[in-house]
Amino acid sequence: MHIQLDEWATPRDIDLPRAVASALNSRQVASVVPTEIDGRWTVSQVRKVGSLTIDGHRVDIRPKLPISRLFFLFGYAQRRRLWLAEETRLDSTPDLVPAIATAFLRQLGVAVEQGLLQGYRERHDSDTVVRGRINFVEQFKRRPGLASPLELRFDEFTVDIDENRILAAAVERLMRLPLLDPASRRTLLHFRGMFAEVEALPRGLPLPRTREDRRSEHYQPALSLARLILTNASIEHRVGEHTASAFLVDVAQVFEDFVSVALRDSLERSGGQVLSQRSDRLDALGYAVVRPDIVWQSHERIDAVIDAKYKAERPAGYPNADLYQMVTYCTRYGLRDGHLVYASGEETPKSVNIIGAPITVHCHALELTGSQEEILGSVDRVAEAIVASRASADLPPLLNDVRFDTEIER
């Protein structure tokens, strides 16, 4: 069975196997509830895009945005100009997974065109001949009183470095997704052979951090896409009696990352510093914390607070949840103005004056369907509005004197 869904489409009733309905709910892809007709389900709030396969049933979720625009948001947030080479090709591919795979294979080809990147990696070995340094701790632990063999520690110049491990892991992950065309699979097999001397990444651990320098500059676009693949693609595994695999992207997170980076670029042209996901105490004892998406500050004083909202939050009983959250931020930081940045179409641009408090919440809308220049121009206009409403210098110092010693470690 092949099921086609659309991101944040209007609710509709469709026939679904119970295992598929359960997977969509458990992975928080969508809200799926049974109807009165057996085997028929109401699907709503489709929050992620990509593909899910369970027991041979495939579900494809198309994004609202053109794939090239989604790719642009991701690339910009990663500080990679990936979209320049890919834009004309991406929208010709109707589904997200083949598009991402094609882009990754193209960038991977560029990265390894002159061979795999090499670097020094610390090795541990036992030998009768000294190479590198003797690891005396391990020697006494494993062979107390024995002079041979020796426990050694040395640096080896090798292709088995973290950069190649990440790329090799992305190749393996894509190989396990049952959504690729034969040509892509043949290309993946070719690259798998190139990484034969690279060890697999340990399962369950965070991806290793890698340094960006002149040596690895040509690797960075492929590494960015590899991290996207490894973060969002789950390998085939058992869910009870069922077998599932998926490549699912949270577009809301991509949007929030893009807004954070793009607004930083625009706001810092007016001075100050932009921080993402800063945490501060809400009460004196630290029982509660606030963590706005973006704060703009100068000389440790908060000038503006901004939250990015791909979709307006309207949980049952709290139809204005976004406003409540922003009023809390403004109260905490002693600001007269707060800013909510939505994707266009999710909220009407407006300013909401709060009764009983000198606070105005400004709702902005970013247009994401235009050209790259138009999208960034929309960000600049939001930044200009934020600068225009910069917090006044005569606000009460008790609230606005937010210093780094109030931060909570994440």
Image (cartoon, rainbow, N blue to C red):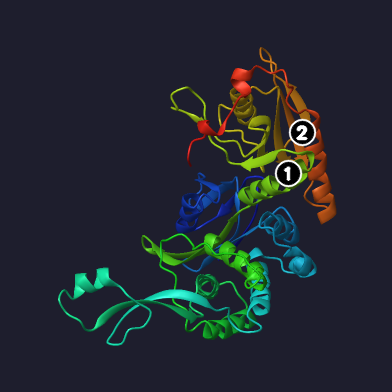
> What is the x, y in percent for residue 325?
60, 29
* Residue that mark 2 sits on: 386
Tell me, yes or no, if residue 9 can be seen here: no
> Could you tell me which quadrant the N terminus lies in?
bottom right
Instruction: Give 121 or 167, whichever is nearer the viewer.
Output: 121
Which mark, by number, is residue 16?
Answer: none
Residue drawn at point x = 63 percent, y = 67 percent:
213
275 shown above or below 323: below
Q: CA distance from mark 1 to mark 2?
A: 10 Å
Q: Are marks 1 and 2 in contact (CB under 8 Å)?
A: yes
Mark 2 residue element: helix
Point out residue 407 in the picture as x, y percentages from the top left corner. 52, 34
Residue drawn 65% across the image and 27% down it: 323
Q: Residues within 10 Å of mark 2 (few under 14, many from 20)?
A: many
Front residue of 390/123: it is 123
Tag 1, which secondary structure?
Answer: helix
Percent x, y for residue 216? 62, 71
Find residue 72 and report its image quarter: bottom right
Q: Name the kind of residue labelled 2 in the image.
A: Ile
Q: Position of residue 177 (x, y in %)?
A: 53, 71
The single residue placed furthest to the left in the displayed view is 145
* Count of all numbered marks drawn on residues in the image: 2
Q: Foreground: 400 or 384?
A: 400
Q: Amino acid at mark 1?
A: Leu
> Can you say whether 402 is above or below 185 in the image?
above
Whether residue 74 is visible to the viewer of this picture, yes or no, is: yes
First in sequence: mark 1 vs mark 2: 1
Label 1: few (<14), some (14–19) or many (≥20) C-alpha neighbours in 10 Å: many
- Residue assigned mark 1: 263
Q: Residue at x 74, y 42 (%)?
A: 268
> Residue 217 sits in which quadrant?
bottom right
